[in-house]
Structure formats: C-alpha cells, structure tokens
Image (tube, grey):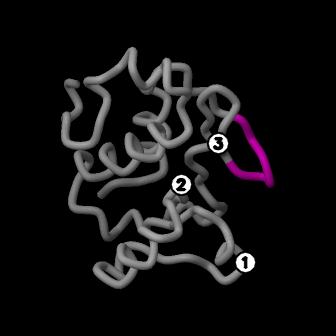
Amino acid sequence: MIDAEDVRRIALSFPETVEKEAWSMPTFRVAGKMYVTIPDDQTSFAVRCPRFERAELIAAEPEKFWVPPHEASSAWVRVRLAALEGVDELRDILVDSWRQAAPDRLAEQHPDLRPGAGAGG
C-alpha cells in the first residue's frame, strides 16, 4: 500500500525540491513554491490543482479526490493515498503539481519529467 513515505521519496526525487515543515506538517517546494503537503494523519496529501479542473476531478473520482471546507477557496486538492492505483499514478499526480510550481526554465530543462513518463523518466 502507498504511504506518506512514498510521497516524500518521489517528491524529493524531483529537481530542486526541498522539504520544509510548515503548519506542523511536511511540505515540499520547488524554487520556494509549495507543491505538495502531507497533513497530520498521513492518509492523504495535498497538491496544486487549478480550481476549474478540481471540480471535475472530484466529480469523476470522489473516493480519491476531495477538498476540506477550509481549503475550498484554494487551488489545491487532497488525494487519498488508499485510493491510488499504484506508485505510477502517485508519481503522475506529484509531477503535475511540481510542473505547476516549478519555474519555466526548470520545467524546460526536464522535459522528461511529466505525467505518464514513468519512474525511469
């Protein structure tokens, strides 16, 4: 089963990612911009997600994606670890969030780092 350590390991494998504690939880940042957090209970994680896409994600897979009421106005979505199909799906979600936060120059330097590229890419 996928757990918070898998989130940490994959996030830290991305270029220029650093882990920093904030709000008493681990957060992961690229170029100073946060792109993933692991809340206290470690049963889910939060990633960047444009609000116009978020509603579609939640409607399509409500068992996987959700937003707590206090984060409703944010551009973030939570993902239940137990609902993920495997580490490739976890990696794709994290890559997507990383690309949203990474500076253009960094994303351009890593064209192989994109959803669907697999753990080797």
Question: Could you tell me which secondary element the residue under label 3 belongs to?
Answer: strand
Q: Is 73 rendered above or below residue 106?
A: below
Residue 26 falls in image quadrant: top right
Apparent side of residue 56 relative to residue 42 in the rendered image (left or right) = left
Q: Which residue is mark 2?
A: 48
Question: Circles 3 and 1: CB distance less than 8 Å?
Answer: no
First in sequence: mark 3 vs mark 2: 3
When the figure is inspected, residue 57 is found, relative to residue 12, above or below; the finding is below
Q: CA distance from mark 2 to mark 1?
A: 15 Å
Based on the displayed image, in which of its 4 quarters is residue 54 positioned? bottom left
Q: Which residue is rendered at x = 60% and y = 38% of the image?
A: 28
Q: Which residue position holds label 1?
A: 70
Residue type beneath disc 3 = Met
Q: Residue at x 22, y 54 (%)?
A: 86
Q: Earlier in the sequence, mark 3 or mark 1?
A: 3
Nearest to N terminus: mark 2 or mark 1: 2
Q: Tell me the magenta residue range.
A: 20-25
Q: CA distance from mark 3 to mark 1?
A: 18 Å
Residue 99 placement, left or right of 25: left
Which amino acid type is shown beneath numbered disc 2?
A: Arg
Marking on residue 56: none
Give the secondary structure at mark 2. Answer: strand
Residue 71 at what x, y percent from top left? Answer: 67, 72
Identified by mark 1, the residue type is His
Name the disc covering residue 34, or none: 3
The image quadrant where one finds the C terminus is top left
Toward the right, the furthest residue is 23
